[in-house]
Image (spheres, rainbow, N blue to C red):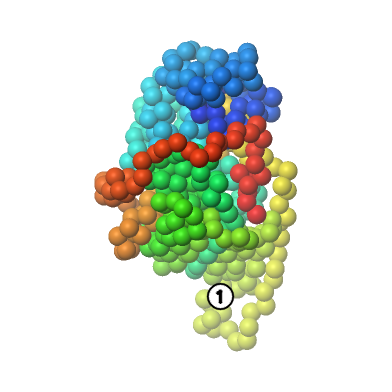
Amino acid sequence: MNNKSSVRVGIVGVGNIGSAHASAIAEGKIPSLTLTALCDNDEKRADELRRSYPSIPVFENAEKLFASGKVDAVVIATPHYAHPPLAIRAFSYGLHVLTEKPAGVYCGAVREMVDAAKQSGKLFAIMFNQRTNKLFQAAKDLMESGALGEMKRNVWIITNWYRKQAYYDSGAWRASWRGEGGGVLMNQAPHNLDLWQWICGMPCEIYADCGVGRFHEIEVEDEATIFARYPNGATGTFITSTGDYPGTNRLEITGTLGKLVIENKALTFYRLPISERNYCLTAEGTPKLQPEAVVIEDESYQGHHRVLEQFGRAILYGEPLVATGEEGLRELTICNAAYLSAWQNRTVSLPLDDGEYLSELQKKIDGGKAIGKARSTDQSSTEYHPRWNTNW
């Protein structure tokens, strides 16, 4: 329990998403948080921040922000590789940490983050804002309540992450193994991979095909198909791409007691009157489907606000986080396993061998391009792009 009315928070990395977080907190949209420091290691960007936020200290070095005594917690919104080392340093200063997704590029580094958080006794959260969408929450409830029965199969087609070449050219760190650590699975789809395992559980085997630079001039994948097998024998398919236009966002899960479909801002649950397994073996005729539990999404919700607010309330009042940083390991495990499977053309069993993955990733980094100057500049906005919540 904390006697303060709000938590002093700093933001490290004030680019696109970091700018939106800063604006939301500074404008009082997150009652549990007060913006008290900013940090960006780009000198030009730091000067812009000083003009935009004249009353808030701006640092060009994260270590100085951590040691400043001006914050109780930090939000890390830097490129992916920097998340683990920055979080670990923040924990060493006794600060709470909320990191953007993914938690890191490879699982070994994220395990070090988790250990550092435990040793510090501070909270470790991750920005899985799409968990706040009531459609996905309803799907999870149906699965956990047993209303769907035992899962047989799931298919998620999430191909409306379309990106133009200009997007990949907008930052020097983008679309390389050295700078970003991956492509669509590492950057666009972590939310969906998290929801996939959050709703359906963790698979025990992964086989994947990743199309490298199929639609863009990049060295990482811009499309991926993952085949999953679960401990009960159920199967799953996850298809994503940044090269399909128009794309699709459809999740379908089939169980022994029916089927649920999430598409076009609605969830439809088809409930069977009896178990399909019992019907298959004992009944005659065709079972009558009973569509029900149709939920229409309210697009006015703001998932990022809810994650930030709950982060502050968890620190102040001990309330639960939307997602703990440790949960970021599950999504990243699926992502890493998919890459390893594609690189080695084999089925990968979970849990993953962290050392083997890191060794293979290093080969990709060594064989990739050096990070040079971007051909255009990242444009930072103080607003959340609608696709950052749920991309329908």
Please give the name of the residue rendered at 41% of the width and 19% of the height, measured from the top-left corner: 63
Q: Residue at x 42, y 48 (%)?
A: 182
- Where in the figure is residue 372, as x and y percent of width and height? 41, 37
Residue 6 visible from this viewpoint:
no
Residue 53 on image: x %, y %: 63, 18
Marker count (numbered): 1
Tell which of 34 and 225 is nearer to you.
Answer: 225
Furthest-bottom residue in this view: 284
Q: Position of residue 147 (x, y in %)?
A: 59, 62
Q: Is residue 312 left or right of residue 347?
A: right
154 and 218: which is toward the camera: 218
Residue at the (44%, 16%) spot, across then down: 64
* Quadrant of the image containing the C terminus: bottom right
Q: Is residue 277 left or right of residue 297?
A: left
Q: Amino acid at mark 1?
A: Glu
Could you tell me which quadrant the N terminus lies in?
top right
Q: Residue at x 58, y 84 (%)?
A: 283
Q: Quadrant of residue 85?
A: top left
Q: Which residue is mark 1?
A: 276
Residue 260 visible to the viewer: yes
Q: Position of residue 380 (x, y in %)?
A: 60, 33
As displayed, is residue 39 above or below residue 336? above
Above or below: residue 55 compared with residue 274? above
- Classify residue 29 as left or right of residue 328: right
Which of 171/389 is in front?
A: 171
| Disc 1 packing (10 Å; few <14; some 14–19; many ≥20) | some
Q: Is residue 359 left or right of residue 73?
A: left
